[in-house]
């Protein structure tokens, strides 16, 4: 019975032409070194037949006086497979139970997958705003600026204050409240924690007040700033998911205070973009780092069940106008030199 032929790789020519025939050597297979096919492959070293065993003959191919690899042929139900003996050092695998914070983040991300979210991008020209911001007497972060500006846009757009209610007769619920949800990354006991801060009516606050709120969320104790989230993290997983799901589909007046009307999440402080992230709100704003020419990539993520791409694009246009007019004027007042009055000048 004729032995099978091999192509390429082991037993074949380097250019993929048919290789040498195989002939049976007891229980093993080996290449005949004197075959015409083997002689026709230029540069292929002569195979050496190693000591035989019950599993097959070992074949060693020397190169530059050294043995590169040791391979063996084993019969496998009518065909022969080439198995390489690779020495792998297996490292131990450790497992740890998820804490309440990580479990809560996983639950939010799982629920967010049920929402048909889509992103819309727009590049803002914020060169003048960045120049005035750098001249302010007090440090004002971009998060505070975007938080107030987008709060003003949401106040003007009722659709961005609405959410979808599934069921046999789907409905849209709209609230007059405007609550911002801000993602805050904290380091507690050498572990990172993701927290969600709630700020009521950010459009009615000054950027100084918003910046103070953000600083408090980053520095003050967790039990003081994120009490409700800590209570949610202490619940069993099945109960926590039930609470989140109920709030997501609820028409209660407290829904905005529990989940927020819109959210803001950014990694611009790390020089990175997060143009798509899970959210339970109808819309979520994120922005990237400021480029040298003063431009900034801003992304608005929205629920397609509530709003369409055209409204989201127009909202971004409105947001840029609010930043370059309303917020620019407010920052100019902070950058202006303080007027101490005639009594201070006389002193």
Image (cartoon, grey):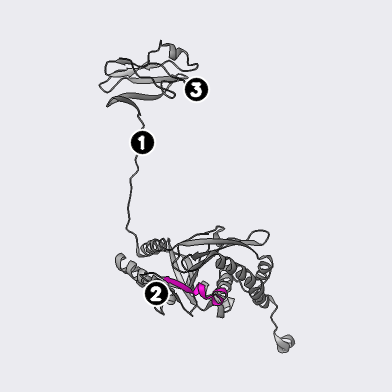
The verdict on residue 156 being magenta is: yes
Q: Earlier in the sequence, mark 2 or mark 3?
A: 3
Give percent across and percent down for residue 237. Answer: 31, 65
| Residue 65 on the magenta span | no
Give the camera-side residue of 275 and 72: 275
Residue situated in front as seen by the camera: 143 or 161: 161
In the displayed image of the protein, which residue is found farthest to the bottom?
Answer: 343
Residue 337 in picture, x, y percent from top left: 70, 78
Q: Is residue 267 visible?
A: no
Q: Is residue 229 left or right of residue 178?
A: left
The span shown in magenta is: 153-164
Q: Decide which of 232, 258 is in the foreground and name it.
A: 258
* Residue wearing tag 2: 227
Residue, disc 3:
15
Is disc 3 placed on a helix, strand or loop?
A: loop
Instruction: Tell me how far mark 2 sits from mark 1, CA to CA.
Output: 49 Å
Instruction: Count neighbours of disc 1 (C-alpha within 10 A) and say few if under 14, some if 14 to 19, many if 20 or more.
Output: few
Position of the C terminus by quadrant:
bottom right
């Amino acid at each position: 019975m004729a032995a099978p032929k091999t192509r390429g790789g082991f037993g074949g020519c380097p250019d993929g032409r048919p290789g040498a025939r195989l002939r049976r050597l007891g229980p093993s297979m080996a290449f005949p070194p004197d075959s015409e096919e083997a002689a026709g492959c230029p540069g292929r070293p002569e195979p050496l037949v190693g000591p035989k065993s019950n599993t097959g003959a070992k074949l060693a191919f020397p190169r530059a006086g050294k043995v590169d690899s040791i391979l063996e042929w084993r019969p496998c139900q009518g065909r022969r497979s080439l198995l390489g003996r690779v020495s792998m050092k297996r490292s131990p695998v450790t497992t740890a139970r998820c804490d309440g914070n990580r479990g809560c983040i996983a639950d939010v991300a799982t629920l967010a997958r049920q929402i048909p979210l889509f992103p819309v991008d727009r590049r803002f020209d914020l060169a003048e705003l960045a120049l005035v911001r750098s001249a302010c007497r007090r440090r004002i972060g971009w998060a505070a600026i975007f938080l107030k500006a987008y709060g003003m846009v949401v106040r003007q757009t009722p659709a961005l204050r609405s959410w979808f209610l599934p069921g046999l007769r789907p409905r849209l619920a709209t609230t007059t409240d405007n609550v911002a949800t801000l993602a805050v990354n904290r380091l507690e006991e050498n572990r990172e924690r993701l927290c969600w801060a709630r700020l009521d009516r950010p459009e009615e606050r000054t950027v100084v007040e918003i910046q103070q709120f953000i600083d408090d969320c980053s520095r003050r104790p967790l039990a003081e700033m994120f009490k409700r989230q800590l209570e949610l993290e202490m619940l069993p997983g099945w109960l926590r998911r039930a609470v989140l799901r109920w709030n997501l589909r609820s028409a209660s007046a407290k829904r905005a205070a529990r989940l927020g009307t819109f959210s803001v999440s950014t990694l611009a402080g790390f020089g990175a973009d997060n143009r798509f992230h899970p959210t339970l709100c109808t819309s979520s704003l994120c922005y990237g780092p400021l480029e040298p020419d003063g431009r900034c990539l801003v992304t608005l993520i929205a629920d397609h069940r509530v709003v369409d791409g055209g409204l989201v694009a127009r909202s971004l246009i409105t947001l840029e106008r609010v930043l370059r007019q309303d917020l620019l004027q407010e920052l100019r007042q902070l950058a202006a030199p303080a007027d101490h009055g005639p009594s201070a000048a006389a002193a």
